[in-house]
Amino acid sequence: MTRILDGKALAARLRARVAEEVRDLRARTGIVPGLRVLLLGDHPASLAYVRTKEKAAREVGIDARVERLPAETEEARLLARLAELNADPAVHGILVQLPLPRHIDTVRVLSALDPRKDVDGFHPLNAGRLAQLSGAPAEDLLVPCTPRGCLLLLEEALGGLADLRGKRALVLGRSTIVGRPMAALLLAHDATVTIAHSRTRDLAGECRRAEILVAAAGRAELVRGDWLAEQAVVIDVGINRVPSPDGGHRLVGDVAFAEAVGRVAAITPVPGGVGPMTVACLLDNTLRACRAQLARPTLTRSSEPPS
Ligand code: GUN
């Protein structure tokens, strides 16, 4: 029997906890966590994602606002806006929706964020801390939302993260948003990690060896049922729009779900698996960022050892 991992239900529990903690924080300190989401241009999928994030954040009591800028905004103008948000004490979390238009240097923009407000965990300081991690992340480390959501789903599937120790885990995809931070998290929990990508030879063979598979390749139903080890735990990050027989569209993952069910131990559905967890983890990261900034109002210089 394959267990279908209900990301919607797990995300609802996390959102309820965040809502309660936001209420508590407000009652104790009068402070409301603030989140700003910057979107350049009007890419329909990005617009839908940022609206979902804004709505979910507001529902848990976070003061969330989307700021839309024209696609042709100059990099200097974006950096100037980030400097203002970095300096604004009412803003605890900043998210720059990716991908950015081609004329903008993404690494320069992400590096310009105050790392304590980097609720996506994409600033090089946060990415570097994650790369050095062993065990669970410290409370003040902001970990990218999708990989963190995947880890929580694995924890649910395995009944705890201790079970990752020594397991063969395959991460399909090497993006900085999902694949690389996911591999770092699995490694931090002592899994034996392989990262596969578009140049990997014998992808099917790599998949068959995996006890844990996190698929983040962005290709509809790339992973077939007979590529999967029986009793594998499969986390499907893919959200791909494909034509449906009725002339409309439907969403499918990177794994052929119907072929996997009945074969693997557990799998996330698409939709209703990883997607809701990404949003819930963003809310939790915003709350954590707010708490850390209240505890430590000034930024520690990189030359100072942490106390
Ligand atoms: N684009 C796709 N996924 C993400 C994400 O998690 N964060 C940001 N900022 N942009 C994205």
Image: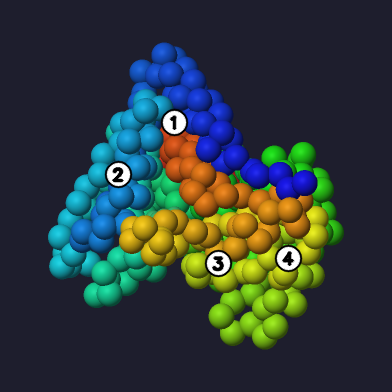
The amino acid on which the numbered mark 4 sits, given as a three-letter code, is Leu
- Label 1 residue SS: helix
Indicate which disc, 3 or 2, sits on the residue closer to the N terminus.
2
At x 59% / y 84%, what residue is drawn? 199
* Of residues 259 and 163, the one drawn nearer to the viewer in this rendering: 259
Q: Nearer the viewer, mark 3 or mark 1?
A: 3
**Residue 158 x/y as whole percent:** 76, 44
The residue that label 3 is drawn on is 221
The answer to whether residue 194 is above or below residue 25 is: below
Image marks 3 and 2: residues in contact by CB distance under 8 Å: no
The answer to whether residue 38 is above or below residue 88 is: below
Q: CA distance from mark 4 to mark 2?
A: 35 Å
Q: Around disc 2, counting alpha carbons within 10 Å, would you say few (fewer than 14), some (14 to 19), or many (20 or more)?
A: some
The residue that label 4 is drawn on is 228
Q: Is residue 135 visible?
A: no
Image marks 3 and 1: residues in contact by CB distance under 8 Å: no
The residue that label 1 is drawn on is 294
Indicate which disc, 3 or 1, sits on the residue closer to the N terminus.
3
The answer to whether residue 210 is above or below residue 88 is: below
The amino acid on which the numbered mark 1 sits, given as a three-letter code, is Leu
The label shown at residue 51 is: 2
Indicate which disc, 1 or 2, sits on the residue closer to the N terminus.
2
Q: Nearer the viewer, mark 4 or mark 2?
A: 4
At x 33% / y 61%, what residue is drawn? 247
The answer to whether residue 288 is above or below residue 231 is: above
Q: CA distance from mark 3 to mark 2?
A: 27 Å
**Residue 23 x/y as whole percent:** 43, 19
Q: CA distance from mark 3 to mark 1?
A: 45 Å
* Of residues 64 and 126, the one drawn nearer to the viewer in this rendering: 64
Indicate which disc, 4 or 2, sits on the residue closer to the N terminus.
2
Q: Around disc 3, counting alpha carbons within 10 Å, would you say few (fewer than 14), some (14 to 19), or many (20 or more)?
A: some
